[in-house]
Amino acid sequence: MSVRILALVGSLRSGSHNRQLAEAAAKLAPEGADVVLFEGLGDIPFYNQDIDVEGSVPAAAAELRAAAGAADAFLLFSPEYNGSIPAVLKNAIDWLSRPYGAGAFGGKPVAVIGTAFGQYGGVWAQDETRKSVGIAGGKVIEDIKLSIPNSITRFAETHPADDAEVAAQVTEVVARLQGHAGAAVAA
């Protein structure tokens, strides 16, 4: 049985180290795990209940919800912006938390990892992301964590997939999330 893991990246920059980390997760995913990067978070309008009306939900938000509905688990990649979660990632969580009581996270396993320039690798943002996605209905797997510090230096000339230590850590993260998702699907 294959497990579909939807990857949401909290940075819109094309050369983002968190995007590269997500690419590494997709490339290094173990057999039976399909990590799919969602494209288009930047096209989704800020959440506004006035425009979240059945039959007229903005197309980009509807695409996100459809991708999330097809996922067995979520892997969120959060950089740290001013000590907190990036707005684009928080906005995606907000859209996926609705409609109230029937959001797309629906108890599915969620892991949050990332990299940042600072010496702690974005742990504040990742902790806030875990909190937010948990409140939004995701089953946050608290013991799956990976915060890679000094991203600008570490990944200046090396893609995360080509960094042996990071590649092993990302592969382990995906395998563990796959295990949680497989158990949830089988239940």
Image (cartoon, rainbow, N blue to C red):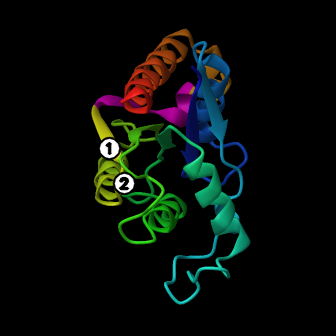
Q: Quadrant of residue 133?
A: bottom left
Crowd rating for badge 2 (residues with CA inside 10 Å; few <14, some 14–19, many 20+): many
Percent of width and height locating residue 144: 33, 29
- The residue at the far bottom in this view is 50
The residue to which callout 1 is attached is: 139
Front-most of residues 41 and 36: 36
Badge 2 amino acid: Val
- Residue at 62%, 75% (x, y): give it: 45
- Which disc number belongs to residue 133? 2
Crowd rating for badge 1 (residues with CA inside 10 Å; few <14, some 14–19, many 20+): many
Determine whether the residue tagged by mark 1 lies in a helix, strand or loop: strand
Front-most of residues 94 and 16: 94
Which label sits in the foreground, 2 or 1?
A: 1
- Residue at 55%, 15% (x, y): give it: 167
Percent of width and height locating residue 163: 58, 15
Front-most of residues 13 and 66: 66
Residue segment shown in magenta: 143-154
State which tag comes first along the sequence, 2 or 1.
Answer: 2
Q: CA distance from mark 2 to mark 1?
A: 8 Å
Q: Name the quarter where the N terminus is drawn.
A: top right
Percent of width and height locating residue 24: 62, 25
Determine whether the residue tagged by mark 2 lies in a helix, strand or loop: helix
Percent of width and height locating residue 7: 57, 41
- Residue at 48%, 56% (x, y): give it: 104
